[in-house]
Image (cartoon, rainbow, N blue to C red):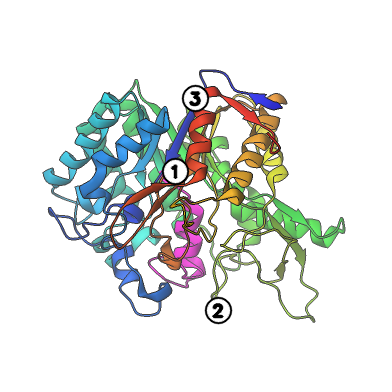
């Protein structure tokens, strides 16, 4: 039975990130990023894995575009490596790096695939981190210059420019809990990073408006669905506080033009927010053509009673420091399974809930699902196939949840599966596989999983069938 039928205009795509797939870490003038430094630091990543080679996309990009075309996808979301095109994060640009992305964009267009380019997917040039990183205002200004260079080079050939990917992760995991690069555990710096990432978005977004006025402008946020363990006032206040840190710290300035007052009050013991200068919030609120939404799992919280053992099952990696600044009295509770290989709960209805919330609060804002997918322990069967039924079920249920939101009025215009390829999964190295295409890291051979064939059929027909079909 066909549960949902998507219109021909609906965009089916896949997504990747530069550091996770490109490799060629020191080739053709690329400079080091914070993820090069972090992954080469002993103890930071599982098995000491690095992105030095990754999926070798830098050398195999044409073949990878062939896979995208064979899948029948209408768009491809990729990220541009800042240190590949501007090695030091300021000053001269690297023509070899720009030429790589120019070839990539032209290759997509030749195959009838829309290029969706993310300017920043976490690979900050190390030189900028050495002078303060995202905790420093200067980094946002350097990002504006970088945006001008790369938008100027690729021009209107890029269909959609996305300024940032998941600034929540960059700020809180990078500067508060330290489980992402640059690995700092400084709560005040994390909140400064929140603002300077927001500011970078606004500045770069205005560059796109000026230099590529026919292109669409986007940002991608990993918005959290936060639920309370009970309806008690204390638990619901915990929901409010985490929602402020996770969601409204970005939605507020980007879409409303102001930080929420409760966020500033909640974090007053950590910082006075004096790094927010007059006019910043207005700069940040550049109108968006589309809001990118990344979703994987949901979050359950309660107010800590001050006596029992703390629970920190937020799904964001183990650390002695928390990413949740000024929320030390909030418990993050384990949730019922099933789980993915990341240990994340599978909760498709939460995606419907999230999209309807955004539709309710921002009714005129078009959206796309810019990442959704699952890591599982894939096995190559005797027949040479990867029968990843659990991934297919995950995708089917979440795409159905998105369709349910569309049916209730949410303006969701596309879906990008994470990920096209198995890749370097940040702190988890190569142990977690998200791809619909398997990568043998020894040989770099690509093999379509059953989920790739399933997604190919969905993109061709626009028909989402029920699990029993």
Marks 3 and 2, Cα distance to the nearest angstrom? 47 Å
Q: Which residues are magenta?
A: 164-191
Residue 189 seen: no
Mark 1 Cα shell of 10 Å, populated few (<14), some (14-19), many (≥20): some
Q: Earlier in the sequence, mark 3 or mark 1?
A: 1
Residue 208 lies left or right of residue 292; in this view the side is left
Closer to viewer: mark 3 or mark 2? 3
**Is 351 located above or below residue 413 in the figure?**
below
User: In x, y percent, where is residue 364?
Assistant: 60, 24
Q: Give neighbour class at mark 2: few <14, some 14-19, many 20+ (Cα, 10 Å).
A: few
Which of 108 and 128 lies nearest the eye of the viewer? 108
Whether residue 265 sits left or right of residue 277 in the image: it is right
Residue behind mark 3 = 460
Q: Is residue 159 magenta?
A: no
Mark positioned earlier in the residue sequence (2 or 1): 1
Query: In this rendering, would 468 be left or right of 36?
Result: right
What is the number of the mark on residue 411?
none
Residue at 80%, 81% in the rendered image: 307
Q: Residue at x 54, y 75 (%)?
A: 319
| Residue reaching furthest to the top | 8
Residue 280 is tagged as 1
Q: Position of residue 339 (x, y in %)?
A: 65, 59
Q: Quadrant of the N terminus?
A: top right
Q: Which residue is mark 2?
A: 320
- Residue at left 77%, top 57%? 237
In the rendered image of this protein, does residue 417 appear above or below residue 384? above
In front: label 2 or label 1: 2
Q: Horizontally, is 179 left or right of 56 in the view?
A: right
Mark 3 and mark 1: span between their CA atoms? 44 Å
- Count neighbours of disc 3 (C-alpha within 10 A) and say few if under 14, some if 14 to 19, many if 20 or more: few
Looking at marks 3 and 2 on the same chain, the residue that comes earlier in the sequence is marked by: 2
Tell me the quarter of the picture where residue 331 sits: bottom right
């Amino acid at each position: 039975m066909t549960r949902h039928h998507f219109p021909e205009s609906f965009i089916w795509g896949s997504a990747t990130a530069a550091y996770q797939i490109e490799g060629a870490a020191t080739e053709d003038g690329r400079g080091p990023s914070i993820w090069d430094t972090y992954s080469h630091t002993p103890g930071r990543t599982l098995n000491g894995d690095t992105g030095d080679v990754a999926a070798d996309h830098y050398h195999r990009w044409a073949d990878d575009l062939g896979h995208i075309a064979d899948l029948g996808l209408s768009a491809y979301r990729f990220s541009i490596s800042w240190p590949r095109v501007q090695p030091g994060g300021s000053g001269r640009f690297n023509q070899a790096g720009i030429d790589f992305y120019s070839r990539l964009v032209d290759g997509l267009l030749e195959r009838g695939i829309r290029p969706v380019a993310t300017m920043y997917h976490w690979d900050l040039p190390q030189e900028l981190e050495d002078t303060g990183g995202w905790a420093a205002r200067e980094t946002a200004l350097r990002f504006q210059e970088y945006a001008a260079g790369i938008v100027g080079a690729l021009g209107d050939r890029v269909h959609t420019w996305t300024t940032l990917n998941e600034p929540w992760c960059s700020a809180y995991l990078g500067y508060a809990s330290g489980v992402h690069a640059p690995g700092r555990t400084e709560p005040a710096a994390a909140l400064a990073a929140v603002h300077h990432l927001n500011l970078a978005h606004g500045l770069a977004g205005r560059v796109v408006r000026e230099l590529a006025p026919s292109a669409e402008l986007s940002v991608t946020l990993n918005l959290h669905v936060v639920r309370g363990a009970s309806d008690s006032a204390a638990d619901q206040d915990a929901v409010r506080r985490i929602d402020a840190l996770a969601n409204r710290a970005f939605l507020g300035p980007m879409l409303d033009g102001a930080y929420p007052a409760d966020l500033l009050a909640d974090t007053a013991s950590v910082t006075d927010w004096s790094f927010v200068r007059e006019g910043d919030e207005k700069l940040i609120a550049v109108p968006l053509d589309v809001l990118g939404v990344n979703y994987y799992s949901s979050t359950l919280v309660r107010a800590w009673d001050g006596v029992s053992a703390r629970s920190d099952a937020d799904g964001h990696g183990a650390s002695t420091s928390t990413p949740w600044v000024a929320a030390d009295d909030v418990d993050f509770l384990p949730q019922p399974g099933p789980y993915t290989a990341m240990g994340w709960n599978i909760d498709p209805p939460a995606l419907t809930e999230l999209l309807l919330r955004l539709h309710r609060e921002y009714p005129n804002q078009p959206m796309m699902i810019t990442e959704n997918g699952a890591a599982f322990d894939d096995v190559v069967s005797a027949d040479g196939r990867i029968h990843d039924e659990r991934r297919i079920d995950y995708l089917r249920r979440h795409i159905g949840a998105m369709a349910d939101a569309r049916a209730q009025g949410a303006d969701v215009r596309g879906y990008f599966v994470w990920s096209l390829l198995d890749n370097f999964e940040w702190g988890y190295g190569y142990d977690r596989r998200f791809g619909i295409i398997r990568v043998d890291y020894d040989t770099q051979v690509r093999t379509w999983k059953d989920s790739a064939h399933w997604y190919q059929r969905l993109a061709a027909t626009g028909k989402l069938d029920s699990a029993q079909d």
